[in-house]
Amino acid sequence: MILRNSAIGIAMLAATSVQAADFKWASTTDPQTMDPHAVNSAPVLGFLNNVYEGLVRRDKDMSVQPALAVSWEPIGEGDGWRFKLREGVTFHDGSTFDAQDVLFSYQRASGEAADTRSWFAPVSEVIVVDDYTVDVMTTAPNPLFPSSIANWMIMDQGWTEANDAIVPDKETGNYATINANGTGAFKVTEREPGLKTVLVPHEGWWGDVEHNITRAEFNPIQNPATAVAALLSGDVDMINPVPIQDVARLQEDSDVEVIKGIEARVIMLGFDHEAETLKYTDDEGKPNPFRDPRVRKAVAQAVNVDAILATIMRGNAEAASQLVSPAMSGYSAAHAERPAFDVEGAKALLAEAGYADGFSFGLKCPNDRYLNDEAVCQAVVSMLAQIGITADLEAMPVRNYWPELREDNYDMYLLGWSPGTFDAEHPVRFLVATPNEEKKLGSWNFGGFSNARVDELLPAIQAELDETKRQAMLDEVAKIIQDEQVYVPMYVQPLVWGTRSNVELTQRPDNFFLLRWVTVN
Amino acid sequence: MTDTIETPTAPTKSRFAKFWDSDFAWSFRHSPVALMASLVVLILLLAAVFAPVIAPYNPFDPASLNLMNGFTPPGTPNAFTQETFFLGTDDQGRDVFSTILYGMRISLFVGVSAVMLALIIGVILGLVAAYFGGWVETLIMRIADVQLTFPAILVAMLIFGIAKGVTPPEYRNEMAIYVLIIAIALSDWVQFARVVRGAALVEKNKEYVQAARLIGRGPIPIMFRHILPNVLSPVLVIATISLALAIIAEATLSFLGVGAPPTQPSLGTLIRIGQGFLFSGEWWILFFPACTLLALALSVNLLGDWLRDALNPKLR
Amino acid sequence: MFAYIVRRMLQSVIVLLVVGLVAFSMFRFVGDPIDNMLGQERTQADIDRLRAELGLDQPFPVQYYKFLKNAVQGNFGVSYRQGRPVSTIIAERAPATLELAFVSGFLAITMGIALGVFTAIRRQGIAANLIMTVSLIGVSLPTFLIGILLIYIFSVELDLLPSFGRGETVMIGNWSTGFLTASGLKALILPAITLGLYQMTLIMRLVRSEMLEVLRADYVRFARARGLSDRVINFRHALKNTMVPVITITGLQLGSIIAFAIITETVFQWPGVGLLFINAIQFVDIPVMAAYLMLISVMFVSINLIVDLLYYAIDPRLRVDARAT
Amino acid sequence: MSLLTINDLTVEFPTRRQLFTAVDHVDLSVEPGEIHGLVGESGAGKSTIGAAIMGLLDRPGRIASGTIKLSGDQISGLDADAMRGLRGKKISMIFQDPLTSLNPLFTVREQLTETIQAHLGGTDAEVNQRARDLIDRVGIPDPDTRLDQYPHQFSGGMRQRVVIALALCTEPDVIIADEPTTALDVSVQAQILDLIKELALERQVGVILITHDMGVIADTTDKVTVMYAGKVVETGPTSQVMGQPSHEYTKSLIAAVPRPTLKLHRFPQISYGGRETRFAIEDMARHWPKVDNDTSKPVFEIRNLTKKFLQRKGLLPWDRTYFTAVDDVSFDIRAGEVFGVVGESGSGKSTIARMIAGLYPVDGGTITFDGQVVSDLTNRAALDAYRKNIQMIFQDPYSSLNPRMRVDDIVAEPIRHHKLMEGSDVKRRVDELLDQVGLGHEAGMKYPHEFSGGQRQRISIARALATQPRFLICDEPTSALDVSIQAQILNILKDLQEHLGLTLLFISHDLPVVRQMCDRVAVMKQGKVVELQETNELFANPQTEYAGELLRLMPKLDDLSTDGLEAET
């Protein structure tokens, strides 16, 4: 699977020629657990990728490469996948890695209590063939399976059982919540949740050591300004993210460097497709204009994405036309055009839909979830005001945001989506498919958009092994989404990291920071 | 020697003349600090009230904003639009000067309303506690203790939460400011209650109160007609200082994200937004609102300070 | 005296019960913990299951009763976010906040009293008036802004002091202290100033006004008439009498230092309970929030009690009244 | 050479409106062992002289001219350090209120030793011995225990002895005693004055005794200086000034002093320096409803009246202790009489007044008014009807009027409350009342602070008369007033009784005043009535030891001039 190269790789020096170093880094959130199966969230998985490993892993350019499995091949006509495991791998506590650990980790990660359960929805069974061979059987052909389990991390059966942590426990926690025993390049030696986590290299790691870190310390720093100050004063060596507005300032400083990339996350506006009437309006009882595609199109044309990119994002982001960024597999190159900024056209569309005099509605927005999310929403409000529709903006912390959306307390909302599989199918499954509890479909399709053709295409896309046919179906879905203007994709959120200038590292598009690619000069 | 009274023929001065001639007014006229402070407060107050007239733009009207004007430095033309703004613009392209004026309206509205509300609650409860004593007093003062346990931030979040639960979603945005007012008032009433209770306990035992009781006046006229006017001086001082505190509390709550909506920013919200641009060189977005807040709060505080001394007969 | 203490204790228990109730009920409105605990790919069934597991589906009084029963045993449950007992987390975080509160409280009290006395004695002096005015600037800016400005000046521009965190700490038993290392002490300076500035100003102004009042008292005039030196009068007679009212307010102020620490800890990423609380709010970590509020109330109530007892120590009138009657 | 000589002393207080001359070209001299009285009414400048001698003038006061010499050395104009050396060591001072002049947070020993240490030095043992001797000398029993107690553990008189001990600490040459006994009960007052006399003689200290009380002057001082408006009007040996005053002001002052031995019909209305204020009793009587005072029937019957105050709050009922302020008191008040209640502070006399007024609930016993039990009234209408008939005049003219209410509102309040009149009638009535009490109806537009103490007491009277009551409770109505004003107010009260037929309950600690005012007197001690007698009978022939003791301690004032006084027949 080749992805478009968006990763910024920095040339590495031979690890041996460089002085060993202490490294400190900071981010806004602390990984809430050290248990790789307890929580399915980016900060946890990103962090634990330094400690645990899966059968496969992603390289600097997101391509899938062997990790604990040295190779894999499909079984039969899509019956499953056979993984050949790496020999001579040891966990941090010295015990050896083998197929039993894989089976155990499957059972653990797919169990009732595991947050990672949905990854294994297509899996019917895992069979230990021999000590270093494992078969993963799927209910239906699943061409993407190996790349979908890059974050499925393998735990040591013996260690986990001995410490009574067989079942991940998010509520009360267990030994694995604050301790870790992986096969990864680094092991956790000190863990104070919410304060700091200390890592040191794993002596017996199977891979080639490319870093020169002797000790790494992670501190969560919530206030972005404090984090910037810490980087500037040299209290930390790397921060993620850098507030967009501070990029220029950091770039000027010779002691620090800014590393920019395009993240997989697309920021978009969503609509309420189901509600009969608007909820936040001065014209009580009027029908919901957003059910009319022309109105949604008008919104798309009214938003001046270039202006947002130029000012709020300061040239650090790219406009988006689809629910995934061009870097993702399955991206539809045929639909790369986003509606042009056209106030008059938008007004005409509104008039055509019968809203020449505009209307008022409620826009919901998080204020601590995406880069400058609140500022973007404000800008959207003023842009929509130009075509005569008045948005009543309410920005709130993300903790209140999701419940609010789930209760349908919005007319329009802001959403960022990063496909966990790095494939265009992912947002279709979660954001576009008709919500279906049982099939775990459309679970983030808050607006309740429903299109029979999309629902029909989705299972076919999931089962199709042929890249071309698959892409054709994905193109069709992309066209439907664009024609219907189900969402208004605005831009792909940038990745902005700051480092001390003596640090060299690699920024991966999924915003995972891996210590094994760090060199401190 | 006998009792003498002023000759009845002496012309009775007008109330204003009397006031102008009083020690209070005299000490005001001769205090440069008080004069300066009240001048600043007056200017800011007028600027806030007449913001729609003075401000060159209406930053609360989203349709008038041009995002491309964003981050224009003070006095220099914008790179894209060539427009020039006296104090620059913020990230949304809002004129900082106009936004400060409009933001001050909100800050002052929140501050004044919160203090008024706190004053009313505090004065009533303080009077009741002092006058009735016993378990009523214990109850009220214990509630005050509990209240003191909760920092304003928590109170604000509690009230936000409750308000969110009970108001229909469509009114929530308009509600934010009133919730802010109630939250600040609820964390502020205690000091009014304490001061009023303390002063009222002293007044309550004075003979004029006994005289009123002897006449047969009930508790309410005695509390509000007799005791209240005599405990107002310390209340006035506290109200002034509370006003400064309330304006700052509003800023702090905005920093923690429980403030005025971003489309209608208060001074505090402006500072919260501005502090994000401190390192990036757009200093004016923080600097001017912060200076305005400082000038406002400092002047009000100085005025409160002066009032405290001027109203304290022992310090004359 | 004994009856007095018992009565105060009873009142305190009631206060705590009420705080418990308020604290507990407010969490129901702050937000829903479920969303943060389940990831992006959760289903309604997952939500219901977790809700049942956490007991969030039970009636309100039952939840409150359970909460109280456990709280009395020091058990505040397990943090939703960290998956560890809340009591352990609080015990880990408390030293940071307590050390910060102690230092800033100490700063506030010593500086506040010293400057208060100075400005009272030299009421007309230029220096005193300057101090009075400058101190007002400290209370005329929001704490978070002062913190950020201090970081900007002392960490970023001058690069003298660390911008965040506690520096290196040393464990003494279960207590992690920053007092014993140079970096720990350096790290304390900015947060302690930020946190203490406001309280210092308040204490200073209070001491000043009380002192001015006391200096007009008859016994001070009489002391003057007996030819005692100004030093003895100001620092022995006047100051001790000034302290009586100052103690109550100061006690309350110290209680609020811990609460105010929330903002300072957020700005300086100080690893104390305030930061823990803000994080808990972000993730709707109800057990942590409940425990924090209870902790604050217990502190407050005990400070109140200590203040009352201090009264006895400092004011003989109360001592004897309690004994004689 | 005199011990202390004051020459041509002028003290000025610049205010923003004018230069106020508090002391105006005063000459004064004091000899060793002599007690020199300084007498005058409030505002006469007598305390300012004391402060000027001590170098403790309040800002912005200053000595404008003149000199003060101590043993021939000039002490006025010395710098602060030199003055501090003198203070306490050469000149000492005793303040009026022993309650507030001792630091409550230090023991008596601490306060004594620090003063001795500051001036005399010495070893701890010496200093402590000296402190003990002093406490012993001023007549405090059990000095060893008392030394380590705090001021609040002493009674008022004992506290004033401590103050005297403190003043004597370092053997000063001059002591300035500023109203040293005003805050004390009459029995204690006599003891303290005796102590001062003794000490002055024994230690040859010159004492300046500042007071407004002619009795104190007559009984204690060797020489006296009478002051008026900052000026000395007359000076000389006490017996001469008191017996044959030469100055008009002195004469008027002396004439206004109530005599224990001589019951006057009215105090003479000799005025000095100001216009006299008329009290239009005839006017008032014309509109007053006719009262038929049947003197045989009591207006009030007080039976077994008891009042307890909670002294210590207990968690449980048996933990609480009570202080019995009024203990099983019974008496009748007859229609039209002036019934006096006399006693020392804390004897319960004011508590009785307040229970009768309905301000305190009754804990035991009954109060019957006109045959109706009023002590357990809860019915609002009945209570109002009762209250309309009784009114009260309070002790402190400064706190008995609401400072934030206009005078006409104050006087109108009872009228409005009882709905006696409406609309413009109220205003007419208020104007009438203010005219009648001699203030003029223009006074209605002003606030209480614009009036002097005597005028305020007239406002109080106007308010009390507004409902045309039958019964007036006077709780120490003149004890806060200067003697000349007291004479006026007492005259007014007498008029009210005689012309309007009002019955008066007159509460006082001042026996000569009681003698002048009352028909019958009840003497109270610790909550009980110990003696109840016709006034003349009581003064001539007290039945109980306690009453006899009170009478004995009362200043005799036999030396005072009786010019212009007419005895009641």
Image (cartoon, grey):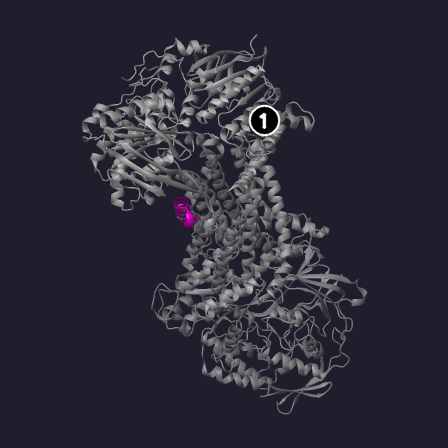
Is D524 magenta? The answer is: no
Q: What quarter of the picture does the N terminus of chain A occupy?
A: bottom right
Residue D462: in sight, yes or no?
yes
Q: Which residue, given by chain and number where applicable, does mark 1 sit on?
A: D135
Residue beneath the point at 27% across and 33% down: D471
Q: Main secondary structure of the magenta part?
A: helix
Report the side of A200 relative to B187 (left or right): right
Q: Nearer the viewer, residue A359 or D207?
A: D207
Q: Quadrant of residue D480?
A: top left
- A366 above or below B274? below
Secondary structure of residue under mark 1:
helix
Which amino acid type corresponds to the residue marked 1 in the rendered image?
A: Ile
Q: Quadrant of residue D307?
A: top left
Report the side of C242 relative to A272 (left or right): right
Q: Nearer the viewer, residue D325 or D564?
A: D325
Is B125 magenta? The answer is: yes
